[in-house]
Image: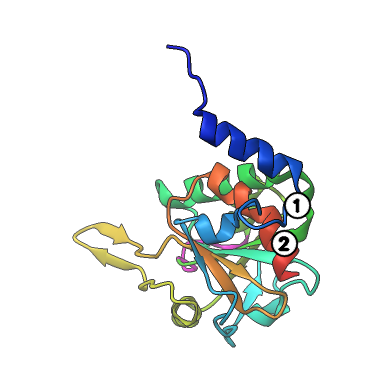
């Protein structure tokens, strides 16, 4: 089948191309506003958690310690997670690769939701499989639960039931401003293309 554009739509496209993009009806759409998989909190960001944890090299770390000239993609997960966590980190890594120049405006931090088993060495080694620049953070599980809930991400302390070790955690990716406030959230399961599509605009508007 040969597709032929509708003449009215073709004329509208020509008119839009012939005038400045800012003209009424021809302005480019806002990808952030149109992305159903992204919760935009930029008008009223969530306050930064005041919980103190530590990086995998033992340096004290708080959510207000994120870079002051970049945005931070924050994820709560654990290294023995069978599916959601490795898939999420892989999608973030791929999204940054596809975002090209915009990637330099982002840091990535993963906070362990299973600090009892995720040693510093284990967390660092696991993150290196995706990108050695990804930062690993861990600390007391109760403090971790509190921090996640400060950002509206529900997690529960690990539980061992009938021989099974369960770690329950939300899968959203928070976008933190330089002060640690959350300016938005990617839904759990958002793929690399969806993340990459918003990274340049978020960097332009939030930094």
19 or 112: nearer the viewer: 19
User: Which residue is depicted at the point 40% across and 47% down?
Assistant: 82
User: Which residue is depicted at the point 31% across and 61% down?
Assistant: 166
Residue 127 appearing in the image: yes
Q: Quadrant of residue 90?
A: top right
128 or 103: nearer the viewer: 103
* Residue 182 relative to residue 18: left or right: left
Cα distance between the residues tagged 1 and 2: 7 Å
Can you give x and y, in whole percent of width and height, for residue 180 in the image? 65, 78
Q: Is residue 95 magenta?
A: no
Q: Is residue 194 above or below residue 161?
A: above
| Residue contact at pointers 1 and 2, CB within 8 angstroms | yes
Q: Which mark is residue 102?
A: 1
Q: Which mark is residue 32?
A: none
Can you give x and y, in whole percent of width and height, for residue 104 in the image? 79, 54
Residue count near mark 1 (Cα–Cα under 10 Å), binned few <14, some 14–19, many ≥20: some
> Extreme left residue here?
162
Q: Which mark is residue 203?
A: 2
Instruction: Return the disc, 1 or 2, that comes first in the chain's sequence.
Output: 1
26 or 176: nearer the viewer: 26
Provide the secondary structure element on which disc 1 rests: helix
Residue 57 appearing in the image: no
Q: Which residues are magenta?
A: 114-120
Q: Quadrant of residue 122?
A: bottom right
> Looking at the magenta stretch, what is its main secondary structure?
loop
Which of the image's four quarters has the C terminus? bottom right
């Amino acid at each position: 089948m040969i597709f032929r554009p509708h003449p009215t739509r073709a004329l509208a496209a020509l008119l839009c191309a012939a005038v400045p993009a800012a003209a009424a009806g021809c302005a480019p759409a806002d990808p952030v506003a149109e992305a159903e998989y992204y919760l935009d909190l930029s008008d009223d960001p969530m306050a930064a958690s005041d919980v103190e944890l530590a990086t995998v090299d033992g340096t004290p770390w708080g959510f207000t310690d994120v870079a002051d000239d970049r945005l931070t993609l924050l994820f709560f997960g654990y290294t023995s997670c069978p599916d959601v966590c490795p898939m999420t980190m892989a999608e973030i890594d791929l999204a940054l690769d596809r975002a090209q120049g915009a990637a330099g405006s982002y840091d990535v931090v993963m906070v362990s939701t299973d600090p009892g088993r995720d040693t510093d060495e284990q967390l660092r080694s696991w993150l290196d499989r995706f990108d050695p620049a990804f930062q690993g953070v861990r600390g007391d599980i109760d403090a971790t639960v509190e921090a996640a809930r400060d950002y509206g991400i529900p997690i529960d302390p690990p539980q061992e039931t009938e021989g099974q070790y369960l770690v329950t955690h939300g899968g959203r990716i928070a976008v933190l401003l330089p002060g640690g406030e959350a300016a938005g959230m990617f839904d759990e399961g958002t793929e690399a293309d969806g993340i990459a599509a918003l990274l340049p605009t978020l960097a332009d508007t939030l930094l």
